[in-house]
Image (cartoon, grey):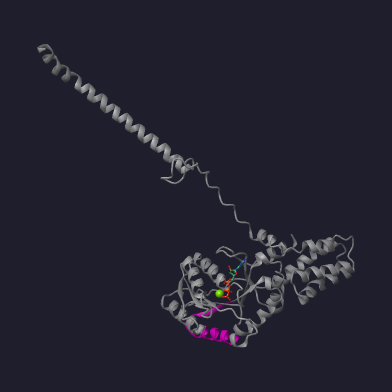
Amino acid sequence: MPALGFFAPRFAAETAPTIFIALAALTIVFGIGVVVVGRRRSAKVKDGGFATQVGAPTAAPAEKPAEQPAEKPSVRERLVKARLSLSGAIATALTRSSITDSTWDELEESLLRADLGVATTTRVLQPLRKLVASKTVTEPGELMTALKNEMRGQLGRVSRELRFDDSLQAPNIWLVVGVNGSGKTTTIGKLGAQQRKLGRSVLMAAGDTFRAAAGDQLQTWAQRSGAEFVRGAQGGDPSSVIFDGIARATARKIDLVLADTAGRLQNNNNLMDELSKVRRVADKGEGEVTEVLLVIDATTGQNGLNQAKQFSEATQVTGVVLTKLDGSSKGGIVFAIETELGIPIKLVGLGETIDDLVEFDADEFVDALFV
Ligand SMILES: Nc1nc2c(ncn2[C@@H]2O[C@H](COP(=O)(O)OP(=O)(O)OP(=O)(O)O)[C@@H](O)[C@H]2O)c(=O)[nH]1
Ligand SMILES: [Mg+2]
């Protein structure tokens, strides 16, 4: 026993450092292992190889990596999809072996169906009749090309740029008018977002004091695009709301006031007088009304021409926004508005979301009609 008593402390003294070193090495190896496994796991989570949410139940089926959102179709593709196309009808007229009276009847009918209106249809076809009479055009195919050129020519003459005067020491004011439900408030929302992206500060003035929810609707759009917002009491004077909006924008050095107005029928004299007053009041304050945008719903067809006439008399419209072209084959109204009234189509609405407002491009539009 004494021998054991002698050896035990000695043995312990000799082996203790070895055990300590072995334990330390084991701890380091284990630590490295934990880190490596942890890294691999988090890399897989990032790659979408595991359930992508941290803390997701381990039994949950692994999610597929999120697919890239499909690229949005081009404006042209969206116009074509709207079935603005005349070509179906025109093709029948032009697949004949020669140009006959029936060709003209069919062409006329298809242009009227696309909502060009009688006057514009006559104006488009007249020069073509001359070309055929003088035998400059003899083949149906050539007639198609001549028709396309003529339609392009009808639309080619105006500036479609939104008017913004940089030199003003006060806000630019864009007034938005139109009949009920044409898309005024939505257009202001989209336009506000675009203008903010251009780096301009924007204030939206809720001049629709008529409809209870109109102010809230505009406020939501203002919040989305980071625009300032001014509203008045329901049933109050729309001119004073817009005047207040302009005053606030001037005080805060805001670049652009987008003024919403209540929808109204163009033949309601009282409401059209009210709109004229809105325009006069907007002119009186600081800043300058550089655009009066008339919003027309493409699905209303030829009535749009009448709207454009009456609203123009009341407010001196400077441009048209044609909305809901995504759901209408009635885009032909653009020809009548431009050629008969000389008001440029400036923007086109192709849907309800913030990106669905695009510049009107006449060539693209005519091409889409013929696809
Ligand atoms: N498909 C489609 N819908 C649109 C377009 N523009 C507006 N809308 C929809 O049309 C409806 C009416 O739009 P609003 O912006 O409220 O129309 P408004 O002219 O302000 O209406 P009022 O203020 O009541 O006169 C809404 O459901 C919009 O989402 C467009 O270009 N395409
Ligand atoms: Mg509205």
Q: Position of residue 106 (x, y in %)?
A: 84, 67
**Location of the N terminus (image quadrant):** top left
Please provide percent x and percent y for residue 338. Answer: 69, 75
The C terminus - image quarter: bottom right
Expressed as whole percent of the image width and height from the top left, the position of residue 7 reads 14, 14
Residue 112 screen position, x and y as percent: 78, 71
- Quadrant position of residue 357: bottom right
Nearer to the camera, 360 or 83: 83
Is residue 61 shown left or right of residue 251? Answer: right
Using the rendered image of the protein, determine whether residue 248 is visible from the camera's viewpoint: yes
Magenta residues, start to end? 272-292
Residue 167 visible from this viewpoint: no
Foreground pick, 109 / 251: 109
Q: Quadrant of ligand 1?
A: bottom right
- Secondary structure that dominates the magenta span: helix
Would you place residue 146 above or below residue 168 in this image?
Answer: above
Please identify the quarter of the rendering in which residue 337 is found: bottom right
Q: Is residue 263 left or right of residue 285?
A: right
Q: Does 262 appear above or below 60?
A: below
Left or right of 176, for residue 24:
left
Marks counted in the figure total 0
